[in-house]
Image (cartoon, rainbow, N blue to C red):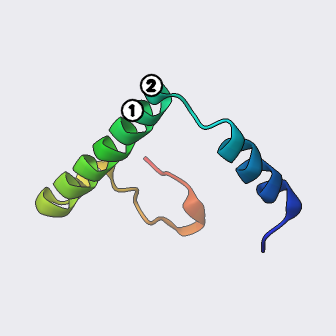
Amino acid sequence: MFNMRQFFRMAKWARNPPGEKQVKLFLIVVALCLVLFGIERLVGWPDWLTMDNTPGGKITR
């Protein structure tokens, strides 16, 4: 749902766009996320990072 707060934020952003450094930082972060996603899709998710599906979410040892 679109609300007025989002509209005012977009208007403020259109009047005062972010600087060049902030745009570069954003693009670097997006590129890093895409690289990590690509590596995960090609290699797979390691088993040691997968949580055990235990009843009640309790970890038993």
Q: Residue placed at 60% from the left, 65% from the top?
A: 56
Nearest the eye: 43 or 4: 4
Q: Is residue 2 above or below residue 18?
A: below
Going by the numbered disc 2, the residue's amino acid type is Lys
Going by the numbered disc 1, the residue's amino acid type is Lys
Label 2 element class: helix
Residue under numbered circle 2? 21
Q: Residue placed at 43% from the left, 46% from the top?
A: 61
- Residue reaching furthest bottom? 1
Horizontal side of 58 relative to 14 (left or right) equals: left
- Residue 8 horizontal/vertical position (percent): 82, 51
Residue under numbered circle 1? 24
Nearest the eye: 37 or 12: 12
The numbered mark at residue 12 is none
CB under 8 Å between discs 1 and 2: yes
- Residue reaching furthest left? 43
- Residue 34 horizontal/vertical position (percent): 29, 52
Q: Residue placed at 44% from the left, 25% from the top?
A: 21
Question: Which quadrant of the structure image shows residue 6?
Answer: bottom right
Horizontal side of 60 relative to 16 (left or right) equals: left
Q: Quadrant of the N terminus?
A: bottom right
Q: Is residue 28 above or below residue 56?
A: above
- Residue 10 horizontal/vertical position (percent): 71, 52
Q: Residue placed at 30% from the left, 45% from the top?
A: 31
Cα distance between the residues tagged 1 and 2: 5 Å
- Residue 46 horizontal/vertical position (percent): 22, 53
Nearest the eye: 51 or 10: 10
